[in-house]
Image (spheres, rainbow, N blue to C red):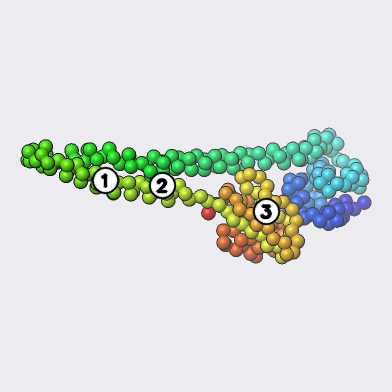
Amino acid sequence: MDVGSALHQARIERGLYIPELVYRTRIRAEVIEAIERNDFSACGGDVYARGHVRALAAALDLPVEPLLEAMGAPTEASALEAVEPESLNIWTLQERSRVPGERRLWVVAGLAAAVIVIALVWQSRHGSGQPVPVPPAPSTPAASSPAPTTPAASPTASSPSPSSSPTSAPSTSAPASPSASPVATGTTTGAVTIAFACSQTSWLRVTNASGTLFQGTLRAGDTRSFSSSSDVSVVVGNAAGITITANGTTYDHLGAAGAVYTNTFRVA
């Protein structure tokens, strides 16, 4: 049996691209391409080559024993036994590798929420509070009474006029500055609006802080669009087959046919 041809034919029949196998097996794309050409030199030895074939067969739902028999007897049986548990637990390793990234995204989301709460609290205290600028009113006449030379005029009928003039001045000018800045900062929220237009069959994966937004194969003419309040990460299996529009900016000519394109679009 031709091991490389069998794996290649199974992948084509299932409509899978090499980036999808990379995601499922954690085997590098160039190693998978070499195995499909029956070139196992990139695997790093017979033991690792057999482990890669096991992982690929599991991802493609193929019986693994005929493939291993076609490869011949292992040269290092003891080392193979040590490698096999790692290849059999490929899905567990995949989930473990995803956890640190998700934790970082949740930390970023928590910090953003804390900033928004602080801004709202500051706005509620300073934006609507004429009581906050009022305390300077009594201190203003005391500080602005540089006319101690007329002590007789202050207790007399002229006392209402200085009391009214300082109160009117801070009531109009003081609240204006604190109320304008919180409104500008507290109401600004960021988002990523992203759309995909497919001109050739291509595999696509879209994720954000909440998890996977989309993962699958798009055909020519298909479109997808998403809106996210956190950064959006994109993996394209056929760079020549998809055009991306993110926050009004169009990204085309992402690469050659069959090339893998990855990018992270930040919150505007």
Q: Position of residue 152 (x, y in %)?
A: 7, 38
> In this rendering, which labeled residue sits more in front, label 2 or label 3?
2
| Disc 2 secondary structure class | helix
- Graded by Cα atoms within 10 Å as few (under 14), some (14 to 19) or many (20 or more), the crowding at tag 3 reads some
Q: Position of residue 266 (x, y in %)?
A: 56, 52
Residue 180, relative to residue 114: is it above or below?
below
Query: Label 2 vs label 3: CA separation?
Result: 38 Å
Q: Quadrant of residue 66?
A: top right
The residue under the point 12% across, 41% down is: 157
The answer to whether residue 210 of the structure is visible from this angle is yes
Q: Position of residue 72 (x, y in %)?
A: 90, 45
> In this rendering, which labeled residue sits more in front, label 3 or label 1?
1
Q: Are marks 2 and 3 in contact (CB under 8 Å)?
A: no
Query: Label 3 vs label 1: CA separation?
Result: 57 Å
Residue corresponding to mark 3: 235
What amino acid is labelled 1 in the image? Pro
Residue corresponding to mark 2: 182
Residue 172, relative to residue 244: is it above or below?
above
Q: Nearer the viewer, residue 242 or 21?
A: 242
Residue 164, relative to residue 224: is it above or below?
above
Q: Quadrant of residue 141?
A: top left
What amino acid is labelled 3 in the image? Val
